Structure formats: structure tokens, C-alpha cells
Image (cartoon, rainbow, N blue to C red):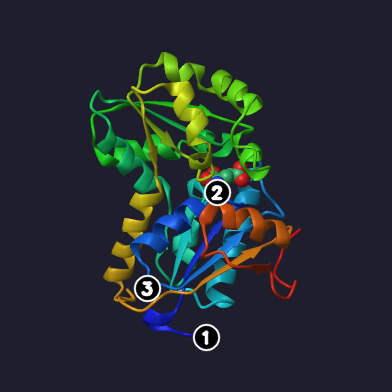
Amino acid sequence: MPTGRDAPIGMFDSGFGGLTVARAVIDLLPGEHLVYIGDTGRYPYGAKPPADVRRFALELGRSLVDDFGAKAVVVACNTAASVALDELAAVLPVPVVGVVGPGARALVHATSSGRVAVIGTVGTIASGAYERAVAGTGAPVSLVSAACPGFVEFVERDQTTGEEVTVLAQRLLAPVREAGVDALLLGCTHYPFLSGVIGDVMGPGVRLVSSADETAVAVRGALEAAGLLRDGGTGTHRFFSSGDVARFAELGRRLLGPELEEAAAWPETGATKGE
Ligand code: DGL
């Protein structure tokens, strides 16, 4: 297993959503090797009890370090980052980067009016993680939050346009529209795949903000700080799924791009997956 700078960045999400973060990391850090696990066998995380999500996150984080030699772990899932980031950072012997802090920073930079919103899964919104993260930026903004149950399932079904998802978006985003915000954080890594529908519903006066680019910058910062940045060369990219591997490869390639050449089953041995 390669070590030090040549070890891969490990990344996980409940499914395809974290590929938005993987895309940004590959674009910003083309020399880095990447291992991505989509836990499609147990998705969605958003409505699950926080204790279950925490257990999945610890299992995935440990597997990335122990089985793949990851030099850093990126929690490319807001739901998991909202409830498990501190615990992951405490138990894993490598830098751990989440999406909530970077998302909050990107959001407060995007607003002119100071009225902002975040949408996410039920688990993310209920956790209050974004209230804490936005307050932690010190920016004088007022934040509206809304859960959007159902959005993730549309993405996982590859149904990112059309009447059904538009009708749901109109209903779920109504309180956000009424709040008169000028910036909306897509606080679930699946949601950038719905940005066409969400943008149409919110209208041109609202800037949609994704945490992906800011997270990639945070990953670079964490690697630099640890002396682990792999500058130069071409990275390799490996993708794993705990669900239907062929489907993960096929849809994942369309969502991420040509770097997703193939996918394999996780866990590789069947020994580390919980029920
Ligand atoms: N991409 C995950 C997130 O950012 C989706 C969670 C889910 O599986 O419901 O929260």
C-alpha cells in the first residue's frame, strides 16, 4: 500500500452525492489518488437515526484508512458530517475533512443581503450543524433552514428533471422563497445534481451555493498542513459501492465523468460491513 504523499485521499457518501465533491477534488488536485465509497446499499442516510449514521460513518472511515491506506478522509455527505465529524476526527489517525464548515463559509461569502438559506436532509437540518457552522463564521447573516425529504431519492433514481421532481421542489422550497434570501446552500451533496430544478424554482435572484469547491480547498489545506500534498503526477481514481456495483459504475460515470471507469464492491471481503 502506498504511504505518505502517495497514499490516496479517502472519501465517502451514502451514494452518488459525494461525486460532486470528488469532481471538485479531482479538478483542484489532479495529482492526488482517490478512493471513493458510495454506501448505496444502505442509502439514504437522511431519515435514519443519527446513531446508525454515526456507526456507518465510523465503519467507512476506518475502512478507508485500514483497507486502503487513506492519508486523509473526506466526509462527502452532509448528514454524516453533521452527526459524526467530531468522532471521526477523534478516532481516525489522519486528517478528516467534512462538508458543513466549507459549505457555511461558501454561503456567507455568496450573500449580499445577509439573508441566506440552507436545504438538506431531515438528519442534517435536525442536527443544527449549519446553524452552528454559520454562527461560527462570525458573519452577520440570518439563516433559514429547510429539509427536503425525497430529493436524494430522485437523484439516486437518475430523475433530475421533469414534473414530479419540480412539483416536489415547489412545495419544499416555498418557505425558502418566502424568506427572501439571496443565497441558498445546497446542504446535501446530492442536490447539485438537481440545481436546474432548484434554480428554476428559486428564480434568478437567488444564488445556489455548493460546498464542493470550498471542500476541495479545505482538503488541499489539510494535506498541506500535514505535509501530505502530492504535487505533480497524475492521480488514479477508484470507486466502490456497497450496493449495485454495475449501476454505480454506469450512473456514476455519467454524473462524475470519465475518471469513473469502473466500480467494485465494498467491502472487498464482506467482513467489515454492518447490517
Ligand atoms: N449526500 C448525502 C448528504 O449530503 C445524502 C444523504 C442521504 O443519503 O440521505 O447528506
Q: Position of residue 197 (x, y in %)?
A: 52, 29
Q: Which amino acid type is shown beneath numbered disc 3?
A: Gly
Mark 1 Cα-neighbour bin, 10 Å: few <14, some 14–19, many ≥20: few
Q: CA distance from mark 2 to mark 3?
A: 22 Å
- Tell me where residue 209 appears, x and y as whole percent: 37, 38
Q: Earlier in the sequence, mark 2 or mark 3?
A: 2
**Are the residues flagged by discs 3 and 1 in contact, CB closer than 8 Å?**
no
Q: Residues within 10 Å of mark 3 (few under 14, many from 20)?
A: some
Q: Residue at x 30, y 43 (%)?
A: 105
Q: Residue at x 53, y 36 (%)?
A: 194
Mark 1 beta carbon near ligand 1 (under 8 Å): no
Compare residues 16 and 252 and report the one nearer the observer: 252
Mark 2 and ligand 1: say if the CB distance to the nearest ligand atom is below 8 Å: yes
CA neighbours of label 2 inside 10 A, class few (<14), some (14 to 19), many (20+): many
Q: CA distance from mark 3 to mark 1?
A: 17 Å
Q: Which residue is mark 1?
A: 1
* Residue at left offset 28%, top offset 70%: 224
Tell me if I can see residue 79 in this picture.
no
Amino acid type of the residue tagged 2 in the rendering: Gly
| Position of residue 96 in the picture relative to residue 256 (left or right) | left
Is 100 above or below relative to 229? above
* Amino acid under disc 1: Met
Q: Which mark is residue 31?
A: 3
Q: Quadrant of residue 90 in the image?
A: bottom left
Q: Say whether mark 3 is within 8 Å of ligand 1.
A: no
User: Of callouts 2 and 1, which one flags the residue occurring earlier in the amino acid sequence?
Assistant: 1
- Helix, strand or loop at label 2? It is loop
Instruction: Indicate which disc, 3 or 1, sits on the residue closer to the N terminus.
Output: 1
